[in-house]
Amino acid sequence: MLGSSLYFLQEKLIFRPTPLDQDFVYSFNHNFEELFFNTPDGATLNALHFKSPDPKGVILYFHGNAGNLSRWGKITEYFVDLNYDVLVMDYRTYGKSTGKLSEQALYDDALLFYKFLIKSYDPSEIILYGRSLGTGLATKLASKVNINQLILETPFYSIEDVAKSRFPIFPVGSLLQYELPSYKYLNSVKCPVTIIHGTSDGVVPYESGLKLAESTNIPVKFVKIEGGSHNNLVSFNRYHETIKACLN
């Protein structure tokens, strides 16, 4: 019974969107442009493009599995303070974005935003940043395109790896519709990779992020934040030191 519930409810377990009215007005501390993108399959994707006065480059940010841009916009302003432009989108069903969710649709949408950026930025100026759920999209995209570097905050080896830690008695591999197998794509990434993970992460186990780092033959800088949990790495000096080292 629980196994069948996991199969039918897995999208609700993985994705926790908060919708927004289409006329919702965003308010942030930095200059930004609100964008809407139409996809070939009829979805509309809402995004924020923050502009720094004198940018060193641009960060294409893939956010976590909960909330919407009213939250993630504030989180990504951290990078604008470090003199980077930022482009962050809401996934399908999040915020003002519409369309049917699927793993392939998420990958396609990520590529759509990269293609938008390369009209205005050189690939050497583009940094992909993934957080939690977004690390799966960032890693797949980084395996396909040219970028400056890839930064992964609280990543997973695969969705199955995380699910096994939560539901160890079920054959979750046969139940999952979403795989997000980051380990399959990381070997094809040809830019510097930094992984940041807290040892007390109760959402994506620290061991899953470490397993991802150790699964590849490419050089990966793995940053262990002792005592860090899933949503509080920004409160640790080691996080700030790592990000500033990457971005400088």
Image (cartoon, rainbow, N blue to C red):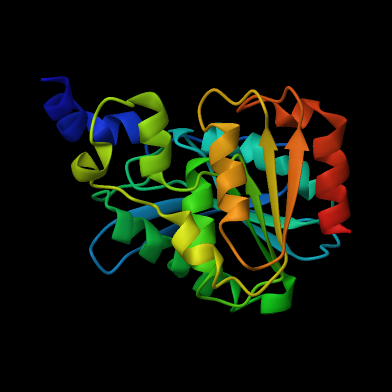
Which quadrant of the structure image shows residue 238?
top right
- Position of the C terminus, as image quadrant, is bottom right
Measuring 51% from the left and 47% from the top, which residue is drawn there? 134
In the image: residue 72, left or right of residue 110: right
Give the mark count.
0
User: Please, is residue 124 above or below residue 93 in the view?
Assistant: below
In the image: residue 48, left or right of residue 197: left
Q: Position of residue 38 (x, y in %)?
A: 34, 63
Which quadrant of the structure image shows residue 163?
top left
- Inspect this view and state whether residue 216 appears: yes
User: Please, is residue 128 above or below residue 101 in the view?
Assistant: below
In the image: residue 160, left or right of residue 24: left
- Closer to the camera, 127 or 120? 127
- Closer to the camera, 235 or 214? 214
Which quadrant of the structure image shows residue 234?
top right
Q: Position of residue 77 (x, y in %)?
A: 72, 42
User: Please, is residue 200 above or below residue 29 in the view?
Assistant: above
Q: Position of residue 72 (x, y in %)?
A: 58, 37
Measuring 21% from the left and 29% from the top, which residue is drawn there? 6
- Position of the N terminus, as image quadrant, is top left
Measuring 71% from the left and 62% from the top, which residue is drawn there? 58
Measuring 47% from the left and 52% from the top, which residue is drawn there? 136
Q: Position of residue 168 (x, y in %)?
A: 33, 27
